[in-house]
Image: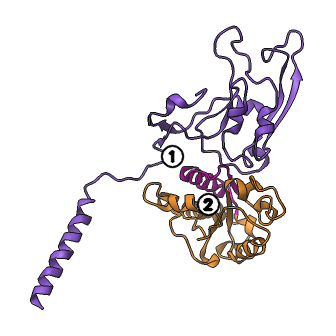
Chain colours: A purple, B orange
Amino acid sequence: MLRDSIVGFWHILRAMGLTFKYFFTKPVTVQYPEEPVKLYPRFRGRHELRRYEEGPYEGLERCIGCSLCAAYCPTQCIYVQAGENKDGIQRSPGERYAEIYEINLLRCMFCGYCEEACPTGAIVLRREFALAGYSRQGLIYTQDRLLQPAEPNAVILDDGTAAGTRGK
Amino acid sequence: MGIETALPEGMVVTTTLEKLVDWGRGRSPFPFLFGLACCAIEMMAAGGPRHDIARFGAEVFRGTPRQSDVMIVSGRVSQKMAPVVKRLHQQMPDPKWVIAMGACASSGGPFENYAMIQGVDKLIPVDVYVPGCPPRPEALLYGIIELYEKIQGEKFSDYR
């Protein structure tokens, strides 16, 4: 009886000691809106339409309006309408450009197939994840919004896979 | 229901009280313990220690619609589940808000077929849409911050 009490007390003391140990460790909580989130490099967030940053086509849109992304998309959330590059106004190299380029982010499942299908590397999935909105219409991203670079509130971790990602 | 019905219209006190009540409502939206699919897993992760939904006062997942303020529709809503979701929403007391979490709840997502409701807003009014498949817990937290911003602008007269 007495022996059981002492053993029991010792066990409770050990358990409480373990609890007390965590009192001194750093909290695991990520204070998200104030602190950036740690993301792995392969995380896929909001799409971005890229422009040529250097070379002879500098400043032009990479998208040539071929609709391969729309064809490959499993949820059919991409709508592309191609237009012809007229004299004087050159929006992309070659003959055609995307006159309308819309992605319904509420349909999208961020699989990255559009990125794989794109022949010019125009569409890439960046790491922006804070996308919540008040209306369905407001979450259909149009071309001018997709052309803006994504600035996620995040730091990208290096897990050694960054070399394998294309166009990032 | 509540204090807003007892107050006569045009009272001076309403302007300041409105802000105080909105602040209180926005800072403690009790979600409804309610998950439909894989997005619910991310919702649970948001309640865990790493993301800690309690920082936004939303840690008390109530098990009954009568005690909850916000319904996080986390997952696809099938035709068979639709009357249940609608009924649970009707059982929630005013003021109530709805977050459509993920692609399926917001628009049907990849399930464009006869068995699925193409967006839960076909059934109940949705306040915040959170895209993602599923959204990260942080994306849901951002949705809750957006909901807080929305609650701040609400008037008592909206619930009369």
Q: Considering the image in quadrants, where does the C terminus of chain A appear?
A: top right
Which chain's residue wears label 2? B
Distance (Cα) linking label 2 and label 1: 24 Å
From the image, tell me which residue sits under label 2. B38
Q: Residue furthest left?
A: A2
The part of the image, by quadrant, that contains residue A67 is: top right
Q: Range of the magenta residues?
A: B128-155
Looking at the rendered structure, whether the residues under marks 2 and 1 are on a common chain is answered as no
Q: Is residue B18 left or right of residue B112?
A: left
A41 shown above or below B79: above
- Given the image, on which type of amino acid does mark 2 rest? Cys
| Residue in the foreground of this view, choosing between A158 and B137 | A158
Residue B152, magenta (yes or no):
yes
Report x, y in % for residue B30: 57, 68
**What residue appears at the point 68 percent right and 71 percent down from the top-left corner?**
B4
Nearest the camera: A30 or A103? A103
Q: Chain of mark 1?
A: A
Based on the displayed image, in which of its 4 quarters is residue B111 positioned? bottom right
For mark 2, does the 10 Å Cα neighbourhood hold few (<14), some (14 to 19), or many (20 or more) residues?
some
Which quarter of the figure is the N terminus of chain A placed in?
Answer: bottom left
Q: Quadrant of residue B101?
A: bottom right
Vertical position of residue B80 compared to residue A128: above or below: below
Please check the rendered image and state whether residue A81 is part of the magenta-colored stretch, yes or no: no
x%, y% of residue B90? Answer: 74, 75
User: Disc 1 marks which residue?
Assistant: A33
**Spot occupied by residue B37 in the image (x, y as percentages of width and height):** 64, 63
At label 1, which amino acid type do we have?
Pro
In the image, which is nearer the foreground, mark 2 or mark 1? 2
Residue at image location 75% in from the left, 45% down from the top = A74
Q: Residues within 10 Å of mark 1 (few under 14, many from 20)?
A: some
Which residue is more in the foreground, B90 or B149? B90
